[in-house]
Image (cartoon, grey):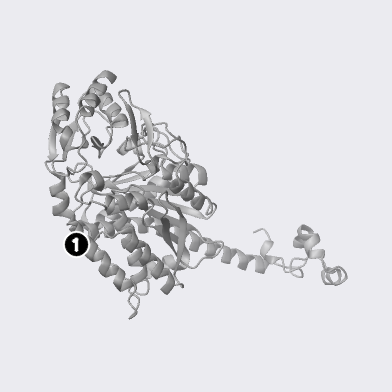
C-alpha cells in the first residue's frame, strides 16, 4: 500500500510546479469501495502535499465519498492512479477557478466594497454599525467594524484581544452582555480554518444581529441581560487574509492552515517543506493521535507540539481564563451540515454528560431545520464524519469541563459538490438558520441562570422566614465582642443568625 502511495507522490514530484497557473483545478469525487482502497486513500490524505492533492473531505468509511482538489499539472497523473487502482470516481468540478469567479465575484469588486465600508466607518457624519450581509469582507474591515462597535456602544459591547498571530495581527472579538461574577459565559468562534468563509460570515451575522436588533428583539435582550456572550469571527486572520490574496486562484483561496514559518519532514520520497499548521489539530487533546499528520505539507499538519502556535496557545489561555463560568463553547466551520459533540478521537467514547449534550444538540438541529428545511446530523466526529484529535472543542470539554461544547459544520451538505464555494445567495439563509440552532444553546444557558436566580431568591425568602436567634443573649454578646459573628461564625449561624445578619447562610 505504501509503495503505491509513494508511486503517485513520485509521479507528481516529477512534474514541475506552476504557481501562476490558476485555471484547470479540478475536484475529484472518489469512492473507496474496499478496505484496501480506503486505507490507501487515508495514507494519501495524511501525507499528500496540499499543493498537489487538497482533500476537502477526509476518507473515513468504505463507500463514503472523498472530495479532492487536484492542481492542473497533476490531474492526468491522479486520474491514471485512480483508474489503475480501480477507484470509482467522477470529476465533480471541472474548473474550480471558473466556479470561484461565478459564485464569489472578482477581486476588484471586493476591494471596492472594503474601501467603501472603511470610508463609512471613518466618516465624520456618524457611526454605521450595520455591516451589509451576504458579502465577504477583509479582516481589516471586520476588525475595524468590531472596534467601532465597542467604541460607540460601550453599554453592550466590549472589544477583546485574544492574542497575536504569527504575522502580527491581533485576534479580535466582542464581549456582549452585562457582566457579573455569577453569570454564565458562552463563546462562539469561526475562521480557525482560513478557507471556510461561510463560517466567518455567519459569526459576523451574529454580531450584526445582536448590535442592530437588541432594542427590538426580546430574545436578544434576554441574552444581553442573562449571559455573557463572546464572539470571535476570525481565529486565523493570517490564513484568512492569505485566502484573499488571489481569491480566484484555488491555490490561495483553498488555503486551510495558519501561516507559520516553513517546517520540513521526509515524506518517503523527498524532504518536503511547507508553511502553516492546522490550528484545529494543535490543541492539547490526544495530540497527533488520529486524523492529523506529522507532515508539514499536509493540510492537517498538527505542528511540532501541542500549542506550538501562538494563535491556539493564546486562545486556550483565553478560554481557560473563563473556567468555572464558561458554560457553552461553539466553533463554526464549513461544510457538511453537522452538529458535532465530544469526543471525536474514537468511536463509542463520550463525555459523562452525553445525554444532556445529545439532547440539546438534537433540539438545536431540529430548530435549525424549521426555517428552510435544512437537514443536519448530530453526533461525535467518528459517528457522523471521521475521527480526529487535537481539536478545540474536545480540548475545551476535557480540560475546562464545559457543559455544551459543539463544532457546527455549516452548509452545504456532505454530498454537495460545491463544498467551500457557497453561493452568495445562501450566506444569509445559512447564518439565519444557524442562529436559530445556536439560540437553543443560548436559551439553555440563560434559562438555567435565571432559574438559579429564582431558586436562590426563593431560598433566601425561606431563610428569612426561618431566621431567628435561638438564645436570648445574642445582642449582649455582640456588644461585648464585636467580632464574634465572624470569629465564631458557625456557632452564631446556629444560635444568633438574626442578630449577626447571617440569615443568608442558613442551610435550607
Above/below status of 426 relative to 7: below
Above/below status of 139 relative to 56: below
- The quarter of the rendered structure image containing the C terminus is bottom right
- Residue at figure coordinates x 45%, y 41% from the top left: 283
- Residue at figure coordinates x 49%, y 51% from the top left: 319
- The quarter of the rendered structure image containing the N terminus is top left
Q: Quadrant of residue 108?
A: bottom left
Q: Position of residue 400 (x, y in %)?
A: 51, 46
- Residue at figure coordinates x 54%, y 65% from the top left: 180
How many marks overall?
1
**Does the image show residue 363?**
yes
Residue nearest the viewer, comparing 470 with 76 = 76
Q: Residue tagged by mark 1?
A: 109
Above/below status of 72 relative to 115: above
Q: Position of residue 398 (x, y in %)?
A: 49, 41
Compared across the picture, whether 280 is left or right of 502 comes to left
Residue extending farthest bottom: 125
Could you tell me which secondary element the residue under label 1 belongs to? helix
Q: Position of residue 340 (x, y in %)?
A: 35, 44
Residue nearest the viewer, comparing 502 with 467 = 502
Compared across the picture, whether 420 is left or right of 46 comes to left
Label 1: how many residues lie within 10 Å, few (<14), some (14-19) or many (20+)? few
- Residue at figure coordinates x 22%, y 61% from the top left: 110
Q: Position of residue 6 (x, y in %)?
A: 26, 22
Residue extending farthest right: 480
Q: Quadrant of residue 470?
A: bottom right
**Does the image show residue 153?**
no
Residue nearest the viewer, comparing 281 with 224 = 281
Compared across the picture, whether 27 is left or right of 404 comes to left
Amino acid at each position: 500500500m505504501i509503495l503505491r502511495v509513494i508511486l503517485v507522490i513520485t509521479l507528481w514530484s516529477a512534474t514541475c510546479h506552476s504557481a501562476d497557473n490558476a485555471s484547470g483545478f479540478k475536484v475529484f469525487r472518489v469512492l473507496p469501495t474496499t478496505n484496501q482502497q480506503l486505507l490507501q486513500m487515508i495514507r494519501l490524505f495524511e501525507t499528500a502535499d496540499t499543493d498537489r492533492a487538497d482533500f476537502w473531505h477526509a476518507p473515513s468509511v468504505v463507500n463514503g465519498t472523498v472530495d479532492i482538489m487536484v492542481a492542473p499539472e497533476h490531474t492526468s497523473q491522479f486520474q491514471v492512479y485512480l483508474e489503475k487502482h480501480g477507484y470509482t470516481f467522477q470529476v465533480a468540478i471541472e474548473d474550480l477557478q471558473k466556479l470561484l469567479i461565478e459564485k464569489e465575484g472578482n477581486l476588484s469588486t471586493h476591494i471596492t466594497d472594503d474601501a467603501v465600508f472603511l470610508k463609512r466607518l471613518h466618516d465624520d457624519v456618524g457611526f454605521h454599525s450595520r455591516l451589509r450581509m451576504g458579502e465577504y469582507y477583509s479582516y481589516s474591515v471586520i476588525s475595524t467594524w468590531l472596534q467601532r462597535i465597542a467604541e460607540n456602544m460601550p453599554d453592550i459591547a466590549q472589544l477583546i484581544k485574544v492574542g497575536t498571530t504569527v504575522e502580527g495581527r491581533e485576534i479580535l472579538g466582542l464581549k456582549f452582555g452585562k457582566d457579573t461574577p455569577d453569570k454564565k459565559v458562552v463563546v462562539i468562534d469561526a475562521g480557525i480554518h482560513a478557507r471556510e468563509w461561510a463560517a466567518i460570515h455567519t459569526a459576523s451575522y451574529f454580531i450584526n444581529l445582536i448590535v442592530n436588533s437588541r432594542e427590538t428583539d426580546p430574545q436578544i435582550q434576554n441574552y444581553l441581560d442573562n449571559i455573557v456572550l463572546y464572539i470571535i469571527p476570525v481565529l486565523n486572520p493570517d490564513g484568512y487574509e492569505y485566502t484573499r490574496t488571489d481569491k480566484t486562484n484555488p491555490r490561495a483561496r483553498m488555503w486551510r492552515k495558519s501561516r507559520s514559518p516553513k517546517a520540513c519532514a521526509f515524506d518517503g520520497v523527498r524532504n518536503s517543506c511547507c508553511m502553516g499548521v492546522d490550528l484545529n489539530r494543535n490543541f492539547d487533546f490526544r495530540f497527533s493521535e488520529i486524523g492529523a499528520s506529522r507532515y508539514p505539507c499536509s493540510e492537517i499538519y498538527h505542528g511540532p507540539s501541542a500549542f506550538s502556535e501562538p494563535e491556539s496557545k493564546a486562545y486556550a489561555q483565553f478560554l481557560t481564563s473563563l473556567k468555572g463560568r464558561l458554560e457553552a463553547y461553539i466553533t463554526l466551520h464549513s461544510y457538511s451540515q453537522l452538529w458535532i459533540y465530544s469526543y471525536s478521537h474514537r468511536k463509542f467514547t463520550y463525555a459523562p454528560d452525553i445525554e444532556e449534550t445529545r439532547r440539546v444538540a438534537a433540539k438545536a438541529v431540529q430548530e435549525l431545520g424549521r426555517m428552510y428545511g435544512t437537514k443536519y446530523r448530530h453526533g461525535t466526529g467518528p459517528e457522523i464524519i471521521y475521527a480526529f484529535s487535537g481539536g478545540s472543542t474536545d480540548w475545551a470539554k476535557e480540560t475546562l469541563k464545559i457543559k455544551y461544547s459543539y463544532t457546527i459544520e455549516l452548509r452545504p451538505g456532505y454530498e454537495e459538490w460545491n463544498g467551500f464555494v457557497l453561493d452568495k445567495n445562501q450566506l444569509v439563509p445559512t447564518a439565519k438558520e444557524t442562529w436559530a440552532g445556536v439560540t437553543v444553546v443560548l436559551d439553555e444557558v440563560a434559562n438555567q441562570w435565571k432559574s438559579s436566580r429564582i431558586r436562590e431568591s426563593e431560598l433566601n425568602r425561606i431563610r428569612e422566614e426561618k431566621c431567628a436567634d435561638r438564645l436570648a443573649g445574642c445582642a449582649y454578646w455582640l456588644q461585648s465582642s464585636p467580632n464574634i459573628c465572624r470569629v465564631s461564625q458557625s456557632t452564631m449561624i446556629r444560635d444568633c443568625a438574626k442578630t449577626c445578619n447571617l440569615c443568608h447562610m442558613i442551610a435550607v
